[in-house]
Amino acid sequence: MVMNMNNLRIFMKVAEKMNITEASDELFISQPAVSKAVKNLEKSLNIKLFIRDKKNGLILTEVGKEILILTRKMKFIENKIYQVANRENKLLSGKVKVGSFPAVSTNILPKTLALFRSKYPLVNIELVEGTSNQIKEWVEDRTVDMGIVSSPFDPYEFKILNKDYMVAIIPEDHELNQEKQIHLEKYQNEMIFCKGGHEIAISKIFQKNNIEFKENLTVQNAETLINMVKNNLGIGIVSNFTLSSVSHHLIIKDINPRITRDIGIITHSFDEVTPATKEFINVMSQYHKSEPFSTEEIDDINE
């Protein structure tokens, strides 16, 4: 059986969009041509890749999900072949697809992208934003070439870019304004948490210090957390790194016990990434070398 790579590429785009019309628009080919390519692929493999539901539209079958992952692997290998050849000709090109959460996109990526583009103008960077957990899933199914996430990094290979820690935020007129630290155990009923990939780090520290982890109010992003705190709904607990990427006029307080986490690059294997991805990782790693943790911080992480 000879595999039609064009049909596979069209299938991959349809699977990403889950919509024939949107896939057609992005591929600059007609809708009938897109439908025909998918049908031809299904016929050649003798399987159903999609379930066509009138109410929910296209739905990938279980085998379709497996084929999608394998197709992405084939696309990755094809991209790598061209990049290796171009590298040999001293002309690095191709695409690097990066998964990142918003704080990284604001604090780390702009200078990295500027430096990388100055060295490799022919390489295209595609940025996909989500939470750390979403990015880990994208790395797993190869939607992205690499991800930038918060710890823990298992089961992926990783390189640490930065260290981070949690802080408390309160309004300027809050009764704790004069306190140097905010003790989590004492005020555990007033905490507002922001989901951002640091839930495991918080949970571990709470367990270590016998503090009950009460999700009194949990929000999805830092902007919402800030608005909640401004309206005196509680004490916000957020990562200092994330907080530095948004504008606010709140008071920042250290918390006790201290909660730390790492921010790093993850991928299936640094040895197997494309040449362009490898160079992007090298540029980012060199530009954002993190300082080593103190002994106390390392103990917090290891516990």
Image (cartoon, rainbow, N blue to C red):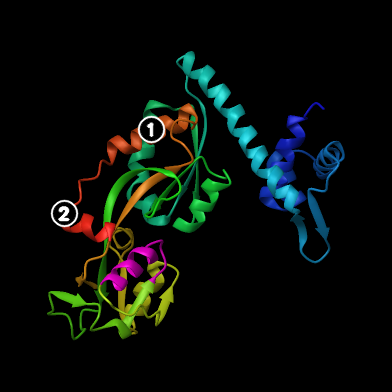
Q: Which residue is mark 1?
A: 116
In this rendering, the answer to whether 271 lies above or below 202 is: above
Q: Which stretch is magenta?
A: 194-208
Q: Splitting the image into 4 quarters, where does residue 67 fall?
A: top right
Q: Which of 184 and 247 lies nearest the eye of the viewer?
A: 184
Left/right placement of residue 147 relative to residue 188 reads right
Q: Which residue is mark 2?
A: 295
Residue 257: image location, x then y, percent: 21, 70
Q: Give the image quarter of residue 208.
A: bottom left
Report the predominant secondary structure element of the magenta stretch.
helix
Q: Amino acid at mark 2?
A: Thr
- In the depicted structure, whether residue 110 falls above or below residue 131: above
Quadrant placement of the N terminus: top right
| On screen, residue 264 above or below 3 | below
Instruction: Indicate yes or no whether the magenta region holds residue 201.
Output: yes
Residue found at x 49% / y 52%: 135
Q: Helix or strand or loop: what does disc 2 sit on?
A: helix
Of callouts 1 and 2, which one flags the residue occurring earlier in the amino acid sequence? 1
Residue 126 screen position, x and y as percent: 51, 41
Residue type at numbered disc 1:
Phe
Q: Position of residue 147 (x, y in %)?
A: 45, 46
Residue 249 seen from this side: no
Left/right placement of residue 203 relative to residue 4 reads left
Task: Say which of marks 1 and 2 sits in front.
Answer: 2
Q: Residues within 10 Å of mark 2 (few under 14, many from 20)?
A: few
